Image (spheres, grey):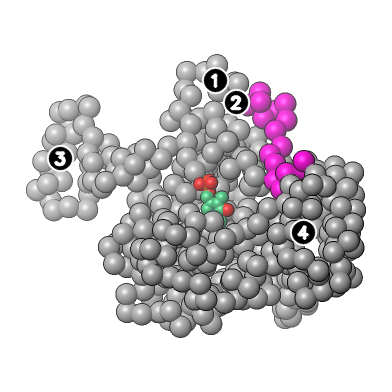
Amino acid sequence: MIPYGHQWIDKEDIKAVTDVLKSDWITQGRKVNEFEYEFAKYVGAKYAVAVNSGTAALHSACFAVGINKGDEVITTPITFVASANCIIYQEGIPVFADIDKDTLNIDPKEIKKKITPKTYAIIPVDFTGRPADLEAIQKIAEENNLIVIEDACHALGATYKGMKIGSISDMTVFSFHPVKHITTGEGGMVTTNNREYYKRLKLFRTHGITKEVNKDVDTVTIILNSIANHFEPWYYEMRELGYNYRLTDFQCALGLSQLKKIDKFVKRRREIAYKYDLEFKNISEIIIPETDQMYLDVMEGFVKQSESSWHLYVIQLNLEKLKVGRRKIFEALRTEGIGVNVHYIPIHLQPYYQKRFDYRKGDFPVAENYYEKAITLPIFPKMTDKDIEDIIRAIKKVIGYYRK
Ligand SMILES: *Cc1c(COP(=O)(O)O)cnc(C)c1O
């Protein structure tokens, strides 16, 4: 079975990890700083903070920007549950806005309809690796004084109007799960250009504890703290309720080694997507992913609005032209050895969300309609040309068999 995603670990990666394992510092050493530094440089952000999962990165970002009890945060129903769960961790209220049927990303027009006086932030997701409509979202955020936390767990290496994803929104979140662009086993990162957010992210990662003396409080407390600090070399203070979200040094060594290969990885993903596009665009039973629109730049001429880094390649079935439903096609492809998948069951249809927030079927028709037709095909850099051929052949065979 060819899975839908898979890591690529080579000898250098293994050496990078074992070198750290043989050293004195296997966690909280300098590999964390190095990885953060290189990652920030790669995406073009001022700051990067490494944590132990993409989910922890989302939670940390929600904390750092100050999402609190009762705050409403708008996100898409077509994403992994973590994009919305992080809001609930901070006792905020997840509010979904429907997707655009072509881009499959959150629809800015729908975001506008969901804004209330309680709205605090927006969490757009760069679904499949294709950047969300960040300019429109930023404009809405500015007009309504909202913060944008971009879930870019699918989009490391993607660009938006020539800028790397990770340098654009107030906060951007990445995951290093093995199916993502680079891996640390489990791991995540938050990038930002805002120094205050950066400091709060670091605090949150280690129990809200710092060794620095608090400079935000009144003078007397500062003096008392300084005296305490001066006389007590063990001094530390806990300022917020944080967690242990640290990433180990050997994982950061793996991340550093993987990051060296990111351009190669993204290039290969784009090649595979291009090949699928060519093969499937003339099959009327299959709707291929919409590719990015061009726009006219006065200086550069026609340029791409954005360039996906292709975490996922999702086709939609044109069900009117098929004798069977999505499930039969899915099962037939699995029988052919193709590890197809479905991303995602809309979050508002999950039992927890239905029970707690009273969402129901029909609330987000575009998302639900997309979900009924979607199948994710395998895409990862380690796929061989033969794997690609096998997948294309299997798709053509199965679609041909069930065609009306
Ligand atoms: C993978 C993923 C996450 C969570 O990342 P983990 O590292 O698995 O915790 C969050 N959001 C999206 C969109 C993801 O794909």
- Mark 4 and mark 1 lie on one chain; the one further toward the N terminus is 1
Q: Is residue 167 visible?
A: no
Give the foreground label among 4 and 2: 4
Q: Residues within 10 Å of mark 3 (few under 14, many from 20)?
A: some
Q: Position of residue 294 (x, y in %)?
A: 75, 76
Task: Find out if the beta carbon at label 4 lies less than 8 Å from the nearest ligand 1 atom.
Answer: no
> Which quadrant holds the C terminus?
bottom right
The residue under label 1 is: 21
The amino acid sitting under disc 3 is: Asn
Image-based side of 8 in relation to 28, left or right: right
Residue toward you, 19 or 388? 388
Are circles 1 and 2 on residues that touch, CB within 8 Å?
A: yes
- Mark 1 and mark 3 lie on one chain; the one further toward the N terminus is 1
Residue drawn at x 26%, y 47% is 240
Q: Secondary structure at mark 3?
A: helix
Question: In the image, is residue 306 above or below residue 142?
Answer: above
Residues under labels 1 and 2: Cα distance? 6 Å
Residue drawn at x 48%, y 24% is 26
In the rendered structure, which segment of residues is drawn in magenta? 1-16
Residues under labels 4 and 1: Cα distance? 46 Å
Give the foreground label among 1 and 3: 1
- Mark 4 and mark 3 lie on one chain; the one further toward the N terminus is 3
The amino acid sitting under disc 4 is: Ile
- Mark 4 and mark 2 lie on one chain; the one further toward the N terminus is 2
The amino acid sitting under disc 2 is: Val
- Mark 2 and mark 3 lie on one chain; the one further toward the N terminus is 2
